[in-house]
Image: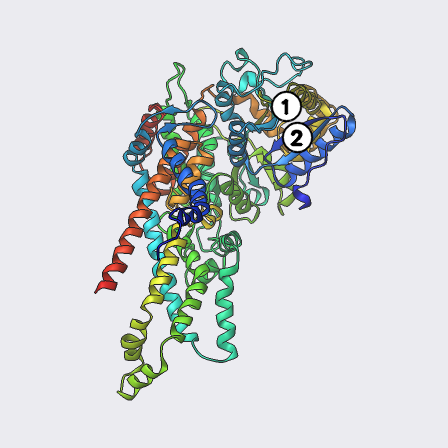
Amino acid sequence: MKPSRPADPYWMLLPSLLLLFVFFVFPLGMLVKHSLFSWDLLTPARYVGLANYRSLVRSGELWQTFGTTLSMSAAVVLGSMAAGLALAVLLDRPGRWAAFVRSAVFSAYVVSWVSVGLLFLWLLDADSGIFASIWRAFSDARAPHWLADPALAPWAVAAVTIWKITGYALVIFLSGLQDVPQTVLEAAELDGASPSQRFRNVTWPLLRPTTLFVGTTSLIASFQLFDVVRVMTQGGPVRSTTVFVYAIYEQLFLDLRVGRASAEAVAFFGILLLLTGAQFMLFRSEESA
Amino acid sequence: MTGCAVDAVPNGRTKVSLWFSYGGTNREVLESLVQRFNRSQTRDFVQAVYQGDYFEGLAKLRTAIAARCAPVLSHVVGEVVPYLAEAGVLEPLADYPGVRELDLIPELGQERTWLAGGARPLCALPFNRSTPIAYLNGDLFAQAGLASPRTWEELRAAAKRLTEPKAGGRFGFGCPINWWFWVALVGQAGGSIVAENGRISLGDEAGVRALRFWQELVQSGWMKPPPGRDYNAWEQCNQDFLSGRAAMIWSSTAFLKYLEAQARFPLIAAPLPAGVKRAVPTGGTFWIVLRGAPSAEKAAAVRFLRFMHEPEQVIAWSTRTGYIPVTHAAVQRLEQRGYYATHSNDRVALEQLTVAEPWPWSVDLFRIQREIVQPRLESAVVQQRDASDILTEARALALEPT
């Protein structure tokens, strides 16, 4: 359809473009500019070129933060999807009990991140937490310091995140399961397929779009991890839970290095852009296949 | 939202906007003193607003200075004063009426908190000043027949003796893995963070000995490294002590009144032990007046500071919190009233001032603390990395241009 006045589409797009420019393009441009300066907010900014980027790479901070973020994200995405799917399959049935459990699991999703962080800080206490009590029932040794041991802390934080967002995955998977046509499942049953075969060969392939959606949203949530890290570990011990968003916060608001924080944010943006591009290409190749 | 509410400024009074960084009892005491000031005269009115812990408050303050909407008055940790002063954002205070006459205890004021601090323009007045001290569980020490450790060897022996390694047991010693306590250990090991010629030495061999002492205590299972960083670790350490999970801790004198009120056992405060000598750093915060504020507000802010340095306010602040009284007059009045005879724990930090070591006046001190040393201390103690390697790495980074 051709507009009667050629300028009309541009006028109509203008409000959205303006908002996009003011709240996205302009701040992004400022971010890139700041990343080329050394600035502490008080003394005059000093142009340093790519020194902030070089420093991030040379100190190993960029790769360490990326590795931590990626490994915690992988754990969160896989964990929440597996738990959400398993619970959805178990709870995809009528009855009050199933409805109660569904609501109970989902309720964690609506609790604030800060409350969840504080709750688990208490539960995971190596001396008086409930997990330590369970540990003591089986062992004479001291319970592990879940949040003080760099080898355990990232997984403890990831587990808390999984607990928090599994309710969301459960609800989405439930709706996906309820969209699977009963006729197809009944046909497979008549053909002699066992429950596991029906799940593997009928339900699971039909859940693919749901799985991709849950995977994408969990990935976004895991890359935005901040509150629970801020409350539970403050990025420690030994930076073992310093994910990207927390690293940017720490550089900017605690160390007051505007340039380094901006460089880290630009790097994070670039990495997310690459990941999104890869995901986009994956979708397209699957669509064309 | 009553916790966030601030009183409106009555007509005709000069507003003094104060940003502070205390929660709990300290906040209550400060707010009560602010109210006392506001009621005591009709010329000025202080509006006190809570801004998070020291580091959050500092971040907000620096952002506000950049945005030209900073308050006229705030308080900041000592490590950051040289940086703010050299950035030119602090108001010189010496020429305001009555400031030169304040009878400050030199170790707690700018004069001796920093090397040659008296030779620089006065831009910081002491507020809540502290030293690290040891807190001992009196029952456990009495049961074990132990006295408060006076040397590192005695500390090691007491920590070992009081440790219960079984599940649900107890650590003999607890201490946040924090720069402040490491600086205390470096001083006790005979070193200093900056050498006499101005080189950032991080204590050289003394720094390594200090770190190895901590590593040994943790590796032996006698000391619990508390989880969390910054003040979360301090709070965790306090809770370990109060719940009996740590028999002895190092913490700030700032927590004295809180710990005394909460402990269900006799609490003994003790000076830190000696390595090759006795030494402690001072800590806490200083009042600063922001240079960019209107002149009338700056003058009003200084009038409030003079009020806060009057003996009754200094006494109220120190006896209700545990911080050290910052003026001679306040200490003398407390002595006359027999306060220290009945509150021997309060005397510990005050007496430790005889071995307090000054900080270097360095604009890089805050950066060295937060970015270079603190993360490496954690790494050395928690991951047991080689102390010498880690401090060599830290020294090299400290010398890099920012």
The verdict on a common chain for dots 1 and 2 is yes
Q: If you read the primary sequence from the N terminus, does the residue marked by circle 1 or circle 2 appear first?
A: 2
Can you identify the residue that label 1 sits on? B326
Query: Is B50 on the left or on the right of A285, as rendered?
Result: right
Can residue B220 be seen here? no
Q: Is residue A209 left or right of residue B73?
A: left
Residue B370, given in percent of the width and then of the height, sits at 43, 32
Residue at the (42%, 26%) spot, across then down: B189
Mark 1 and mark 2 in contact? Answer it, CB < 8 Å.
yes
SS label for mark 1: loop
Q: How many marks?
A: 2
**Would you say B229 lies left or right of B40 here?**
left
Q: Which residue is mark 2?
A: B318
Q: Secondary structure at mark 2?
A: helix
The residue nearer to you, when weighing B104 against A49, is A49
Identified by mark 2, the residue type is Ser
| Quadrant assignment for the C terminus of chain B | top left
Residue A9 is situated, as x and y percent measured from the top left of the image, at 40, 50
Q: Chain of mark 2?
A: B
Please give the name of the residue rendered at 53% of the width and 39% of the height, measured from the top-left corner. Answer: B146
